[in-house]
Image: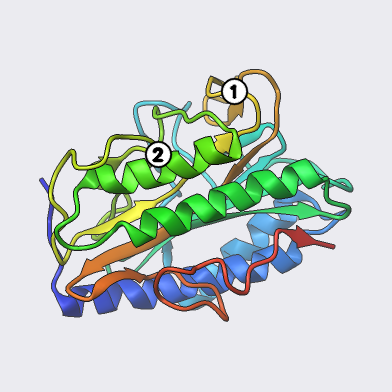
Amino acid sequence: MIELKSAAEIDRMAVTGQFVGELLAELRAVAAVGVNLLDIEHHARSRISEQGADSCYWDYTPSFGRGPFRNVLCLSVNDAVLHGLPHDYVLRDGDLLSIDMAVQIDGWAADSALSVVVGTPAPADLKLIEATEVALEAGIGAARPGNQLGDISAAIGEVAHRYGYQVNNEFGGHGIGRTMHEAPHVPNNGRPGRGMTLKPGLTVAIEPWFCRTTDKIKFDQDGWTIRSADGSRSAHSEHTVAVTETGPRVLTPRPGQVAGPGSRSGQSAVTS
């Protein structure tokens, strides 16, 4: 069932989203050559605890995965793109890192992700990250009352294809609100004019992710980490977005960003 949120409820989600956006920006700065993924994970745990928030990831047990997820971040490196388990790995020069997190504050959730290159970036990696960010902007721009769900998916897919990337629809965006995952599923490719009509109060996490040379994926033995099937690098960008009477409202802006389309302003795909 899809639950439309009131303006007051969206404002409460925005409180959570502001924290998520600020912490993601902080973690992007923490990520650097020589930093262990576990240090990034424990930094996030401390900040979430200080805020009095609850991680949506901790003890998450979906149909996939091997046992409950016991981390507050998904940290995916290079050919890993989704659900990467934080582990004892020291970031190296040129690594492409995707950071994904979702928390609840006072019962309302927000979910967001970004990708960065630590150290010296390869142009192909910057292009890949840019494609996810531009696709995210396009998807957000389509999240307007009267549009169809397929308009969001089609906008994302059009950007992917323009950049020369294929799209996997096994995992994509989703509704969000009182819990991290709600209806509807928001594929990263689709046909415009199809699907449910978007109404004010709909809140969704829009999350394009692309692999450089394939749309096929594989799982690590941990049952969680998803990688490109051919070992090519991958990137992921995500915002929680509300459909409002006046258009899309980004609920997880990073510092320096506006709460609407154009969400890449102030972002950098490189960190030292």
User: Residue sitting at 69 percent across and 65 percent down?
Assistant: 268
Secondary structure of the residue carrying tag 2 is loop
Q: Residue at x 63, y 52 (%)?
A: 130
In the rendering, which numbered label is found on residue 181? none
Check the image and report above or below for 245 versus 111. below
Number of residues whose C-alpha sits closer than 10 Å to that of mark 1, classed few (under 14), some (14–19) or many (20 or more)? some
**Dividing the image into 4 quarters, which one contains the C terminus?**
bottom right
Kind of residue sitting beneath label 2 = Asn
The spot of residue 210 in percent (x, y) is 56, 37
Q: Is residue 106 visible?
A: no
**Residue 211 visible:** yes
Q: Which residue is mark 2?
A: 188
Q: Residue at x 50, y 55 (%)?
A: 101
Crowd tier of the residue under label 2, counting other residues whose Cα lies within 10 Å: few below 14, some 14–19, many 20 or above = many
Q: Quadrant of the N terminus?
A: top left
Q: Residue at x 46, y 28 (%)?
A: 168
* 234 sits left or right of 17 in the view: right
Residue 239 lies in quadrant: bottom left
Amino acid carrying mark 1 in the image? Thr
Relative depth, front residue between 96 and 83? 96
Residue 123: x and y in percent read 80, 46
- In front: 86, or 120? 120
Q: Position of residue 129 (x, y in %)?
A: 64, 49
Specify the color scheme: rainbow
Left or right, 105 with reference to 203 = right
In three-dimensional space, the C-alpha distance between marks 2 and 1, rounded to whole angstroms, equals 14 Å
SS label for mark 1: loop
Q: Earlier in the sequence, mark 2 or mark 1?
A: 2
The quadrant holding residue 240 is bottom left
8 on left or right of 228:
left
- Residue 214 numbered tag: 1
**Is 1 situated above or below 261?**
above
